[in-house]
Amino acid sequence: MSRSLQGKTLFITGASRGIGLAIAKRAARDGANIAIAAKSVTENPKLPGTIFTAAQEIEAAGGRALAISCDIRFDDQVEAAMQKTVDIFGGVDILVNNASAIDLRGVDQLDMKRFDLMHQINARGSYLCARLALPHLRKAENPHILTMSPPLDMNPKWFAPNLAYTMAKYGMSLVTLGLSKDLAREGIAVNSLWPETAIATAAVGNLLGGEEVIKRSRKPEIVADAAHAILTRASRDCTGRFFIDVLALAEEGITDLSAYSVDPNQAAILDFFLEEPISPNVVKSAFHAGR
C-alpha cells in the first residue's frame, strides 16, 4: 500500500499547536485533509497558536484544513465536530487523540477541579472521540486511531509523585489496550505513541523549566515523523502497540536523530514513564527525582 496520507482525512484533537500541529503539518505535506479540533480561538501569550493559525500553517504545507472550535469534554461538541468533518471532507480515515491536560501536583496540593479536568480531557476525551469516530472509521480503507499516551507500567513509582496525572494519562493508554483488541477483527488499527524525550512545546517550557528544558528537548517533528510512519502502515498489520518515537523511526530505517535536537550540544531529557534511554545522548533528569 501507499506510504502516503494523500487524500486521507485526519481528525486531530489539540492540533492548534505543539505535537498535534506537527503531526497535522506532516500529513499536510502528503496532501491530507486535517480537521483541527481544539479550544484555542484567541491568542494566548503563554500558549501561542489558535485553530486559525494552525489552519494557515497546514494549508501552507500542502494540506486542506478545517478549523473547528471543540472542547472534547463535551459530547455534543465532539459529535458536531466529527459530523462537520464528514460533511466537508467526506469521511474520517484517522483519529489522533492528542489533546491532553497536565498537572503534576501531588495528592495534598491538587484540587478536585483540576483532577476532573485532566480525566475529562485525557481519558474520557480519548474514549469519546474514538466512540464517535468509529462509524466513520469503519467505512475507511485503512483506518487508524493513534493516541499520544505512554506504555503501561504498573510500577508504583510512576504513580506516587503525581497520581492524578498518571491516572489520567494511563486512562488514554487503556483506550488503546482495550480498543485494539475489540476492533482487531474489523481491521481498525489502534495504537499509542510516546516520545523518548521531552519535546519542545510551549506546555513543556511553561510547566517543566522554561528555556533550559527546551534546550534539552527534541523538536515536535520527531513525533510527527513517527506518527506518519505508523499511520501509513496497513491497519490490519499494525495494532495494539505502544510505540516510542525513536523505535517507530528505527523500524523505518531512521536512526540519525541529530536533526530533531533543539540544541545538539545538550543531552536530551528522558520523558516521563520511561525507565531507561533508548537512543544515545539522552539522560534522566529531575523528571525522575523520587521515582
Image: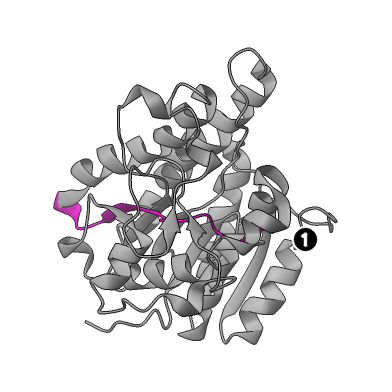
Look at the image and name its color scheme: one colour
Taking 168 as reference, is 88 above or below it? Answer: below
Q: Position of residue 211 (x, y in %)?
A: 71, 58
Q: Position of residue 236 (x, y in %)?
A: 17, 62
Relative depth, front residue between 197 and 183: 197
The residue type indicated by label 1 comes to: Pro
Magenta stretch encompasses residue 197? yes
Query: Residue 37 falls in which quadrant of the image?
Result: bottom right
Query: Residue 64 falls in which quadrant of the image?
Result: bottom right
Query: Residue 246 falls in which quadrant of the image?
Result: bottom left
Left or right: residue 18 compared with residue 174: right
Taking 184 as reference, is 252 above or below it? Answer: below
- Residue lying furthest top in this view? 108
Q: Position of residue 278 (x, y in %)?
A: 31, 58
The residue carrying mark 1 is 48
Relative depth, front residue between 192 and 210: 210
Q: Secondary structure at mark 1?
A: loop
Q: In what quadrant of the picture does the N terminus appear?
A: bottom left
Magenta stretch encompasses residue 76? no
Q: What residue do we see at 31% from left, 78% from top?
A: 254
Left or right: residue 248 compared with residue 172: left
Q: Which residues lie in the magenta part?
A: 185-201
